[in-house]
Amino acid sequence: MNQEEIKAEIRRLARERNALILAHNYQRDEIQEIADITGDSLALSMEAARTDRDVIVFCGVHFMAESAAILAPDKIVLLPRPDAGCPMADMVTAESLRALKERHPGAVVVTYVNSSAAVKAESDICCTSSNAINVVRSLDAEEVLLVPDRNLGHYIASHVDKRCHFWDGYCPTHERLKVEEIRQALDEHPDALFMAHPECPPDILELAHHICSTSGMYEFARSSPAKKFIVGTEMGILYRLRKENPDKEFILPSATLICPNMKLTSLESLLRSLQTMSPEITVPADVRERAKNALDRMLAVPR
Ligand code: 13P
Ligand code: SF4
């Protein structure tokens, strides 16, 4: 089958299976193009929670499909590449989080959605990059544990009036970005605005004109009068930024801004997943109940 035949077969099978195809903003261009909905982690979780389709095919990484399975337990959730993980999510386990909680018994645990279901189950509330500050501000607590991203944690801490403790996790893709690369891009394009994802290290965020989630970048690029933007996040975001803003220029400051896990899903693996209705992602009931509490509390906080 050629690429066009594969796309046609994906669309036909998705209709036949009554499946909703969700794709994260970092997916390959052709996956974003064929998806029913693209979005950031929060938007995709909300879509999973409210869909009336029977099947959710999650083109993203494992923790995202798990969140969909937690929020939509009566649906079949497929992850075309089960090996698409998130190294940051793997930096914390339920056991290691329990040990930290014992050292800070009065603290509220705020866990980034980039985490396993088992870790969410040990948490009081979840957050994403687009609602993290609002989530922490909404808490009636003096002390919080911010898990697992230390960079997002430091960003949140600089915007809230609470005692914050950080887990020492990070996203290897955003962590690779160097201050010198941003300075060089800003020197070469003095009329450009630098937008950065809060997973970037603090010294990078200091140089940003705007800090936001992936979907926040679409909104900023669309509404800003600027014509040029330096993009401080994974390169998959360029597909929609360029498509939606043909009169604007988007500059990637580093060739290393690529998440290998996000690039695993291909049209071929998406088709195979719909054909075989696998691999299915499920979460054990006891873990699911507790993880759902943390996700539901997050979804109740205004964006
Ligand atoms: P958002 O899409 O929520 O900004 O998340 C970024 C990310 O790294 C997902 O893995
Ligand atoms: Fe994980 Fe970073 Fe890849 Fe997102 S971009 S899936 S946080 S490694």
Image (cartoon, rainbow, N blue to C red):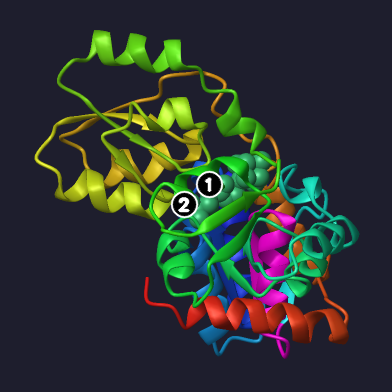
Disc 2 + disc 1, Cβ < 8 Å: yes
Viewer-closest of 200 and 73: 200
Please give left or right for residue 302 compared with residue 274 in the image: left
| 243 up-or-down from 109: above or below | above
Type of amino acid at the residue the image marks with label 2: Ile
Please give left or right for residue 146 compared with residue 247 in the image: right
Viewer-closest of 199 and 95: 95
For this orientation, the residue located farthest to the left is 225
Viewer-closest of 8 and 120: 120
Instruction: Residue under label 1, please give it.
Output: 152
SS type, badge 2: helix
| 43 up-or-down from 224: above or below | below
Instruction: Residue under label 2, please give it.
Output: 156
Across and down, in percent, residue 69 comes to 72, 77
Q: Is residue 78 visible?
A: yes
Q: Is residue 71 visible?
A: no
Across and down, in percent, residue 282 comes to 83, 75
Across and down, in percent, residue 170 comes to 65, 39
Magenta residue span: 56-75
Within 8 Å: ligand 1 and the Cβ of disc 2?
no
Task: Let me know if residue 43 is in the magenta part.
Answer: no
Label 1 crowd bin: few (<14), some (14–19), many (20+), radius 10 Å: many
Question: CA gap, disc 2 to disc 1?
Answer: 6 Å
Please give left or right for residue 241 compared with residue 65 in the image: left
| 41 up-or-down from 153: above or below | below
SS type, badge 1: helix
Within 8 Å: ligand 1 and the Cβ of disc 1?
no
Type of amino acid at the residue the image marks with label 1: Leu
